[in-house]
Amino acid sequence: MKLEFRRNKIKTYIIASAVAGVMMTGFLFLIAYAPRIDHDADLQMFAGYNNLISLFFMVNMAVFATLSGTMYARFIIEEYKEKRAVLLFSYPVKRDRIMLAKLVAVFLFVVIAMMLSSLLAFGVFGVSETIAPLVDEPLSLHTLSRALKVAIIMAIIAAEIGIMAVGIGFIKKSVPTTILSAVALSSFFCNIMFNMTSDANKSDVAAIIFMLVTTLAGVIVSAILMKTVNTMEVE
């Protein structure tokens, strides 16, 4: 995994994650302030922390799912295209272990990066709320614990969506297909969960169900990819 990070210029993705963290921090302040600008009923649903947390992490998940798809496109799709796979297959390591290392490396990076992004956003927002509150209700320990729980669930979903996307893109060895699949899958999950934001319990249950589904799908896709590279022929 260390070799994969060195070969694929991980610094680029660290910078991208940092930029995403800053942007999501601004987004959190924006949706918290929106109910004060307009008293529209649709905006007032974000006047409390429950819906605020749900919306923030759904959008954050979509951002990092796209990053996940982009990384997998670079780590896997580009590496197994045409004659570039010859170098990989010449390593004195089993083909499936190389594939597994790539999958796990990106998975861990995305989960950790999204968690750090979430800590940055809620850390800054929490300090701000103690000085100049934007949300009517107090920021309680229960709210923070729910935010942490949802952050973990959404980070796993984002990483698993990347694996599902690379499974689709690997069929034709297509980078655009991989990235577009990540965007489409994250949008699909967000649309379903957004319809449940009015009830925090339903929203959290839906997120857990999606996490289990995407994890199962990710395991299946990973197994298929590992089996595929073992039987690949390179000219």
Image: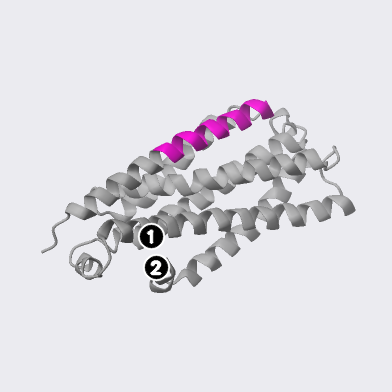
CA neighbours of label 1 inside 10 A, class few (<14), some (14 to 19), many (20+)? some
Q: Check residue 215 for magenta coloring.
A: yes
Location of the N terminus by quadrant is bottom left
Image point (57%, 34%), residue name: 207
- Which range of residues does the magenta coloring cover? 199-216
Q: In this view, does 7 lie above or below 50?
A: below
Q: Position of residue 221 (x, y in %)?
A: 33, 43
Count of residue discs: 2
Image point (53%, 64%), residue name: 16
Image point (22%, 50%), residue name: 228
Q: Name the residue under label 2.
A: 4
Q: In this view, does 183 lie above or below 86?
A: above
Could you tell whether 118 is left or right of 81 in the image? right
Q: Check residue 146 for magenta coloring.
A: no
Q: In this view, does 115 lie above or below 19?
A: above
Location of the C terminus by quadrant is bottom left
The three-letter code of the residue at mark 1 reads Ala
Image point (55%, 68%), residue name: 15
Please report contact status of discs 2 and 1: CB closer than 8 Å, yes or no: yes
Find residue 35 and report its image quarter: top right
Which of 63/96 is in front? 96
Disc 2 and disc 1: Cα gap in Å? 8 Å
Please tell me which of labels 2 and 1 falls first in the chain.
2
Q: Mark 1 points at which residue?
A: 101
Q: Where is residue 25 in the image (x, y as percent from the top left)?
A: 68, 55
The three-letter code of the residue at mark 2 reads Glu
- Report helix, strand or loop for mark 2: helix
